Amino acid sequence: MGRHILHVDCNCFYASVEQQRNPSLRNKPIAVCGSQEDRHGIVLTASYPAKWKGVKTGMAIWQAKQCCPELVVVPPDMKEYIRISKYAREIYETYTDQVESFGLDEAWLDVTGSVSLYGSAMNIAKDISRRVKDELGITVSIGVADNKITAKLGSDYKKPDAITRIEKDNYKEIVYPLPVEDLMYVGRATSKKLRSVGIQTIGDLAEASEESLKFRLGKMGLILSSFARGIDNTPVQKTNHIRNIKSVGNSSTTPRNLVDVQDVHLMFILLAESVCSRLRELASKCTVVEISVRDTELHTIIRQQKIAVPTCSSLEMARVALELFQANYHWTYPIRSIGIRGSGLVEASPFDQLSLFQDETRRQRWELLDSAMDKVRNRYGYESIQRAALYTDPLLSGVNPKEHVVHPIGFFGM
Amino acid sequence: MTKKFVPVIVRFDEEGQCRPLVIEFDELHSYEIDAILEVKRRACNEVGGVGMRYTCRINGKETYLWEEKGKWFVVAKE
């Protein structure tokens, strides 16, 4: 029996919410931008007129204004986005209790059990689209399919304000021509590998031989091949409520064991950069730094430290992590994997309380440096810029923490 | 048109249901609500906002009153 799965995606969510509540912003190029310090901010979301001019998520405000001089910059109001997102979720839950939220603006719905009440999954999708428009004043794109991966391709297919059904009868026509990067779980590294062997579209991937995919990508290659053919059995996992992001972490099993404090310091810098970059994307700072250290005998220790001033500076985080490490790890065995997590998240504000006893200017310089690195990386790629310390060990610093993408629940046991 | 936040006198019944009774539009104009015809969540397109929209009958005329995050507003011609 086939399932009926919807993927609902609120178009340009933050920007759309701001345009609904402030009519003077409608139909204009706007960007909701988080600010790290007074002068530096990044684009969290942009409206369509801004996107058409080239404004992209992750760009610095000055860059965005270069592509689009008439851009209106709006500060984020997470409380409001959470409120509207909750209302959207209430709408989805009138059709099914199997709702898996993915961030504030996306959700999968398994409506298999409700289709008989409404006639078809398309009818449910149309209802949802109309209700979101009437009740919340924003638009959604909805994908209708028999699995999560294809449903998400459907919602991505046409934006804004559209419903796309993808089923066996039109699967090849719609999905095959799409670039392979459009497929969920195909990130930059995988895309590179696939393109290097001539796989450019999802269709190419679907038709590629399983042997050669297994050879080049291992088990993942076979999984991606199924996804490309529209086969995905992952369940829509009911999430209790919108997952407020409570912490951001990254860990890595290192390519070789870590044997001294220099190794550990290097890994902390690498991981902290990734964590802090994501904190900045969330317009947040953390007040607690947590490290996890697993040795070659698979014993794990986890230690936390509250910090006086909230931070999203990677050097600050790495420094605290290293102090925690020195105080708590006694090198009985070498280290096999290591992680950093920032929790106790607070909204990043240029007016964070300054401590008289800390070195404030140094922290500010670190944060400015971090944000400059973000911009270079957004433009030229992760590997384009690196802290000198990481050059001392290419094997360890070759770990690219950005590839540890946040996955929806269900498939990889996360 | 402007989003005008207004003082409202409400009544909570024993079930915790809230109903607006009187809209105090300004110092000189208070309007008693004769009946509530409909209550639903609605986005207000004219002036922006998302909340519970009460369709009220006042002196025979139907008008909208919104409750959003604990505050009440109407669309005023200004």
Image: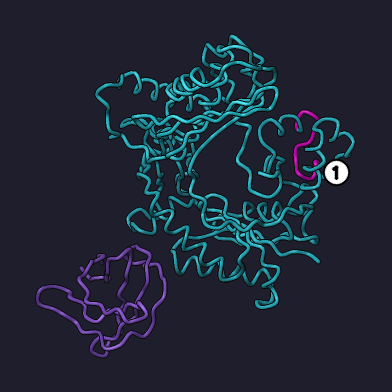
Chain colours: A cyan, B purple
Q: Which residue is mark 1?
A: A207
Tell me if A196 is positioned left or right of B78 in this view.
right
Please state the total of marks drawn on the protein image. Answer: 1
Q: Of the residues shown, which amino acid type is indicated by label 1? A: Glu
Q: Nearest the camera: A266 or A328?
A: A328
Q: Quadrant of residue A75?
A: top left
- Is residue A378 visible to us here? no
Residue at x 25% of width, y 65% of height: B2
Residue B27 in magenta stretch: no
Residue at x 18% of width, y 74% of height: B25
Residue A244 lies, with reference to residue B29, above or below; the image says: above
Which residue reaches farthest top?
A392
Q: Nearest the camera: A380 or A69?
A: A380
Image location (x, y in percent) of residue A203: 79, 45
- Is residue A366 visible to us here? yes
Which residue reaches farthest bottom?
B60
Query: Dot 1 lies on which element?
Result: helix
Chain for mark 1? A
Image location (x, y in percent) of residue A272: 51, 26
Image location (x, y in percent) of residue A31: 41, 44
Residue A206 lies, with reference to residue A90, above or below; the image says: above
Tell me if A15 is positioned left or right of A208 in this view.
left
Residue A196 in magenta stretch: yes
Q: Quadrant of the N terminus of chain A?
A: bottom right
Image location (x, y in percent) of residue A143: 65, 59
Instruction: Please report the bounds of the magenta region as a residue range.
Output: A195-205
Residue at x 63% of width, y 61% of height: A109
Which residue reaches farthest left?
B28
